Structures are given as structure tokens and as C-alpha cells.
Amino acid sequence: DRRQIEDVVAVLRESLGDALVGAYLHGSAVLGGLRADSDLDVLAVSARETTRAEKQKIASGLLAVSGDRSRGDGRRPIELTIVAASEVRPWRYPPRRDFQYWEWLRDRFERGDPDLFRPTIDPDVAILVTMVRLGDVTLSGSPAGTTFDEVPRSDLVEALVADIPGLIDDIDWDTRNVVLTLARIWNTVVTGGLRSKDAAAEWALERL
């Protein structure tokens, strides 16, 4: 896992150079509950919006780094999100993500699908920033506390609740992940904290 993370940071540095403000680990690798098939989640901040050529270079690099242990390649899936610094400090809602790589869209990235390289409004950035500030694992660049403003609780809750319709749509084919994610949403809305999915599920079971 450490080697994969180092490879992701190397791809970012090579592609963005001095424009890379920082890269931060989040998700189950930081909050706990990392499973054999869990993603490695990284949030990166660029000093400016990235160019199409930079996005394509990053995607090409990640195609070589990201993997799927179910295919027997010994590598974890990578989920990388990039935001421009102006989108997260000063904080505004809803924020816009500049780019995102998902392993499950590998075929579309290999084809160079142009829809994957367009910036888009993404409330989920509020959740990612909250996790990064909570975990405080800086892989490169400025510490998380100086890169990101705190996300107001109301924005975090709104972003979490906005995910529910999409989760329900996916429940038939991604059942375990959807149920765990719903448990974490419930936990965060009630407690204001942000736990791993496993810990949130244990909390939820006591209340069902």
C-alpha cells in the first residue's frame, strides 16, 4: 500500500509540478476499516485548475498504478480527486471538483472519454475535505489544516444526504458498500462525527 501511495504522489508531482499544493490520504486507510478490497483514497489540491493535457497525463499514470486484487494484480484500486485551491479556501458550497479518477471507470479512461475530464459541481468534496482534516495525513505539500478551511456542519450534512438517492439506485449491485455508507451517513447526521463505515455500522446496529 505504501508503495502505491508513493506512486500516486509521484504521478501528481510529475504531472502538476509546482502547481501541486498538497496531496492527502483519507477514507478507510485513515478512518479505519481498511479491507482487502478497499480503495486507497487521495485528495489533491492544485494551485489552479488543471489542463486537459495534465488530466490525461494523471489518468495515464494512474492506470499503471491502480489495480484490483480481485483480478490478481496485487494492487488496490485508487480513487483520486483533485480540486483547485480556490474551491476549498475560502470554503464555498457546493464546491467544484476539477478531476476524479475511479478504478471502476478504467475502460472509459483507457478510451479517453472526454466526459471524465470536465470539472463539475460535486457536494461530495465537502465530505472528502472533512475526512482529510480529521485524518490529517499529508502525503505531499502543505499540512491539511493550512490548505483547507473547516466545512460547516450544515454543508457536510447536506452533502451526505444528497448522496442517498444515488446510493439507493446502486443497492442491488453494490449492497454491502451502500448499507455501510448509509450507516455512516446516519451516524454523522446524529453525532456530528465521521467514523469508519465498520464503526458506523456497529453504532447503527445498536439502534435498529
Image (spheres, helix red, strand yellow):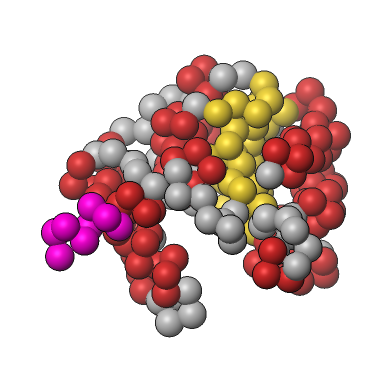
112 left or right of 172? Answer: right
Which residue is depicted at the point 45% across and 44% down? 32
Is 205 in front, or is 47?
205
Q: Position of residue 2 (x, y in %)?
A: 70, 38
Question: Which corner quadrant of the image does residue 134 belong to?
Answer: top left
Question: Which corner quadrant of the image does residue 106 belong to?
Answer: bottom right
Is 204 in front, or is 162?
204
Q: Which residues are magenta?
A: 201-208
Q: Is residue 90 magenta?
A: no
Give the quarter of the figure containing the N terminus: top right
Q: What is the residue that sits farthest to the bottom in this orientation?
A: 172
Q: Is residue 204 magenta?
A: yes
Q: Decide whether the magenta segment is chiefly helix, strand or loop.
A: helix
Is 160 in front, or is 48?
160
Q: Position of residue 171 (x, y in %)?
A: 40, 76
Which residue is depicted at the point 27% across and 55% down? 202
37 left or right of 200? Answer: right
Q: Position of residue 49 (x, y in %)?
A: 69, 37
Q: Is residue 68 visible?
A: yes
Is 74 in front, or is 196?
74
158 left or right of 4? Answer: left
Question: Which corner quadrant of the image does residue 9 belong to?
Answer: top right
19 lies above or below 69? above
124 lies above or below 69? above
Which residue is depicted at the point 42% across and 74% down? 175
Which residue is depicted at the point 58% across and 58% down? 36
Q: What is the residue that sits farthest to the left in this orientation?
A: 207
